[in-house]
Image (cartoon, helix red, strand yellow):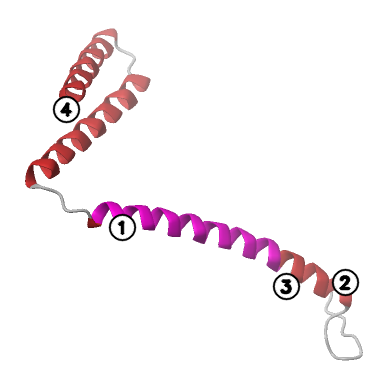
Amino acid sequence: MFGFQNKLDAAGFPNCRDRIFRLCIISIMARGWESKSVEEQQAEAINVSVKNRPVSPEQAAALRRKQGLMLSRQRVLQQMERAQNPAHRQMLEKALFDLDAQLSQLP
């Protein structure tokens, strides 16, 4: 399994060194999975509490608009990283400026 020999002791179990090695591996893996599970549970609890709040249609529309503008801004920034043509870069800078202006006007 882990590249060591399966020598059995008198009770029919793998020798002590192999058992300790397996227990160490299992406990390290268990800690890793446990911490991920706790993080996921905390994130889920936050998401559930946010989702359960009543939101008016106006608030929902404003939230969608803000999320859309943030995604557009992220896309423009990614394109700016790859832009090589100065005219294209200038157009992207103008788009970024406009998006920032729209975001600053939102509540």
The amino acid on which the numbered mark 3 sits, given as a three-letter code, is: Met
Residue holding disc 3: 1
Residue holding disc 1: 48
The amino acid on which the numbered mark 2 sits, given as a three-letter code, is: Arg
Residue holding disc 2: 17
Is tag 1's residue or tag 3's residue first in the polypeptide sequence? Answer: 3
- Percent x, y of residue 15: 88, 79
Q: Residue furthest bottom?
A: 11
Which one is in front in this view, the residue at disc 2 or the one at disc 3? 2
The correct choice, above or below, for 82 with respect to 66 in the image is above
Asked whether residue 90 is in view, the answer is yes
The amino acid on which the numbered mark 4 sits, given as a three-letter code, is: Leu
What residue sits 83% from the left and 73% below the top? 18
- Percent x, y of residue 49: 30, 55
SS state under label 4: loop
- Percent x, y of residue 20: 82, 71
Asked whether residue 4 is in view, the answer is no
Is residue 15 part of the magenta span, yes or no? no
Residue holding disc 4: 106
Q: Label 1 vs label 3: CA separation? A: 41 Å
Is tag 4's residue or tag 3's residue first in the polypeptide sequence? Answer: 3
Q: Label 4 vs label 3: CA separation? A: 58 Å
- Percent x, y of residue 85: 29, 12
